[in-house]
Image (spheres, rainbow, N blue to C red):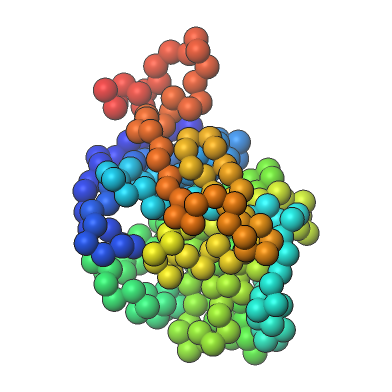
Amino acid sequence: MQVIPLPRRNHSCSYLDNLRACFEEYLIQEITNEERAILIERGYRSFGSYFFRPLCNGCHRCVPIRVPVLKFEMSKSQKKLIRKGKEIRVEVAKPVYSEEKWDIYLDHSRRFPQKEDLPNKDNFIFSFYNPRVSALEFSYYLDDHLIAVGITHEGTDFLSSVYFTYRLDYASYSLGSFSTLQEIFYCKNNDLRYLYLGYYIRDNHFMSYKSKFRPNQVLLSEQKWVDFQDAKGNLLVADDPRFSPQATFLTNLFKGPDEGTTNSDKAHE
C-alpha cells in the first residue's frame, strides 16, 4: 500500500450551515480489499484512491452508518417504492465512463446549488472511473434509457456505497432510496454481511434518510460500532450520535509492533 498524506484544510461545511469542516485526507495506491475493509470499518470514505475522514472541532455529527443486511426488513413505504420502480432495470458491472454518465452527474449536481466547487470532469473520472480501483457500477434503466448510476466498492463481506447520481426528471421514483434497496439486495444475493452507507447526519435531510434502512448501526469511536435503530425504528442509543475519531497517521493501522518506518511515514514527518 502506498500512502500520500494530504495537508489538512479548514473550509466551509458542505452539510451544515455556518460551520467549518476539516478532514483527514490521503491518496492511497495499491490498496488490498483487506486494507480497504480496515479503513471503512474505522469510518474512512473513499472516492477512487482519495480517502478521507472528518476531524472537525466540536461537531462530530458526520457519523458512519451501516446496515447488517441479513437482518434488514423493508418498511411498507420501501415495499411500495420497489413496486413503483418494477419497470426499472438494474445492471451491475465494472465501472465504464461515458459522456452520458457525466451529463447525468451535471444534472444531478443542480440539487446542491450551495456547493462552492463547480463540477469538474477530470475529478469525476478520477473519483469514480479510476481503473486502478476495484469497484462495481449499478446502472438503472427505464425504457432502455439510462436514468441513474451508482458506484460501490465490494469487500470480502461488505459493499460500500460510494456515490449515486440520477436524472432529476425521474426524482418521483425516489431513486436514492431505490438504489440503496438494490444494493441491499445485491449484498443478500452475494453473501455480504454489511452495506456501508457513508455518513449519517441527523440535521441534513440529504444524509439523514440513511437511517430509514433498518436495523442499522453507527460508529461512535475508532472501533465501536453500536446498534442505532431496530427494525421498527426504535432508537437504541441517543438520537443525535457523534463520531469522535482520534487523529492518527493512517499507515499505523497496518503496522505490527516490530515493523519499521515506511516511505510514506518518512514523507509525513
Closer to the camera in the image, 35 or 61: 61
- The residue lying at 41 percent from left, 32 percent from top is 250
Q: Quadrant of residue 119?
A: bottom left
Residue 156 vertical position relative to residue 249 in the rendered view, above or below: below
Residue 114 in view, yes or no: yes
- The residue lying at 35 percent from left, 23 percent from top is 265
- The residue lying at 61 percent from left, 48 percent from top is 227
Q: Residue furthest top?
A: 258
- The residue lying at 38 percent from left, 33 percent from top is 246
Q: Tally the marks.
A: 0
In the rendering, at what x and y percent does residue 123 appear?
35, 60
Residue 110 vertical position relative to residue 1 in the rendered view, above or below: below
Q: Quadrant of the C terminus?
A: top left
Q: Is residue 191 left or right of residue 12?
A: right
Residue 160 in view, yes or no: no
In the rendering, at what x and y percent does residue 92 appear?
66, 66
Q: Quadrant of residue 175?
A: bottom right
Q: Quadrant of residue 138?
A: bottom right
In the rendering, at what x and y percent does residue 171 appear?
50, 84
Q: Is residue 90 left or right of residue 126?
A: right
In the rendering, at what x and y percent does residue 79 appear?
71, 77
Residue 252 vertical position relative to residue 47 in the rendered view, above or below: above
